[in-house]
Amino acid sequence: MKNLIISIVLVLGICITGFAQQVAGHIEKFEGKVILYPSGSVRGIAAKNNLEFKVKDSIRAFQKSTAFIKFIDQSKIVLNENSILYVKDIQNLNLKNGKVVFEIQKQDDKQGIKIATKTAIIGVKGTKFLINVNKDEVDVILKEGEITVSAVKGEFKRYLQKEEEDFNKFVQDTKQDYEEYKKKVQEEFVEFVKEFTMKDEMAISIKGKEVRDIKDTKEFDDEFELLNKF
């Protein structure tokens, strides 16, 4: 009986230790004020170079601060100022606020990695992109690769950009003016979708349920350069 109890205690100890040691990655370096909040704790730990973080931990970069993070699969993440990242598990992250740059290594499994925001879930299997969360507005800038964007609730109202040739063809075919074309655009070039795919160099802005393309993404170039700093 005594041996049985000892065996059970040892097994439980191994299980608990295994769970406690679910290291997700480390903060390789940082600038300014960066705090790691261990699971279940409201008291944070001041960041230091190569500080490990685990599943269920949160990392916050304060004003004028940056955190350079590397996951166990060598994926890189840069938290810019006023960003909060929650590590739900190895394959599920939650971005609560701020601007974050991702360089995700290719995932062998079918599920890949998911990054959740308040309004959208980004599905990734290996790519380089940026997410900027500001209250109910989410910008997604895809540098390379392919990602899926899914609505947390209901469907997105996706506005589709049409090229100038579409307008010229419309005028030629119908002999109608630009005002009529705009009316047709509003009627025909909107789709309601639960999920859509983004590819190389695409950028979108989500506000509430509405999704619109972002034409000029040059302002984000410097953010992607941060990935080369570690």
Image (cartoon, grey):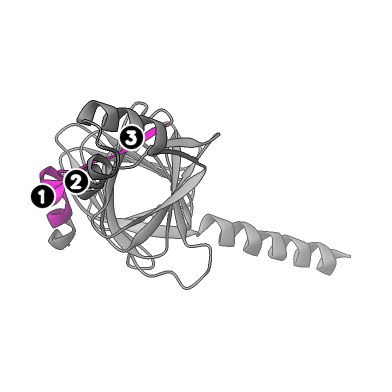
Of 36 and 178, which appears nearest the observer? 178
Q: Nearer the viewer, mark 2 or mark 1?
A: 2
Question: Where does the image place residue 127, in percent across and percent down from the top left?
Answer: 32, 62
Q: Which residue in the protein does label 2 denote?
A: 164
Residue 136 at least partly seen: yes
Q: Which mark is residue 210?
A: none
Q: Which residue in the protein does label 3 denote?
A: 185
The residue sitting at the right extreme is: 1
Of 158 and 66, which appears nearest the observer? 158
Q: Earlier in the sequence, mark 3 or mark 2?
A: 2
Question: Where does the image place residue 84, in percent across and percent down from the top left?
Answer: 34, 38
**How many numbered marks have been drawn onto this rendered protein structure?**
3
Q: Which residue in the protein does label 1 denote?
A: 222
Look at label 2 and name its amino acid. Glu
| Helix, strand or loop under label 1 | helix
Question: Where does the image place residue 184, in percent across and percent down from the top left?
Answer: 35, 32
| Number of residues whose C-alpha sits closer than 10 Å to that of mark 1, classed few (under 14), some (14–19) or many (20 or more) | few
User: Which stretch is magenta?
Assistant: 210-226
**Residue at point 81% right, 62% down?**
5
Q: Is residue 167 highlighted in magenta? A: no
Q: Are marks 2 and 1 in contact (CB under 8 Å)?
A: no
| Number of residues whose C-alpha sits closer than 10 Å to that of mark 3, classed few (under 14), some (14–19) or many (20 or more) | some
**Residue at point 21% right, 49% down?**
165
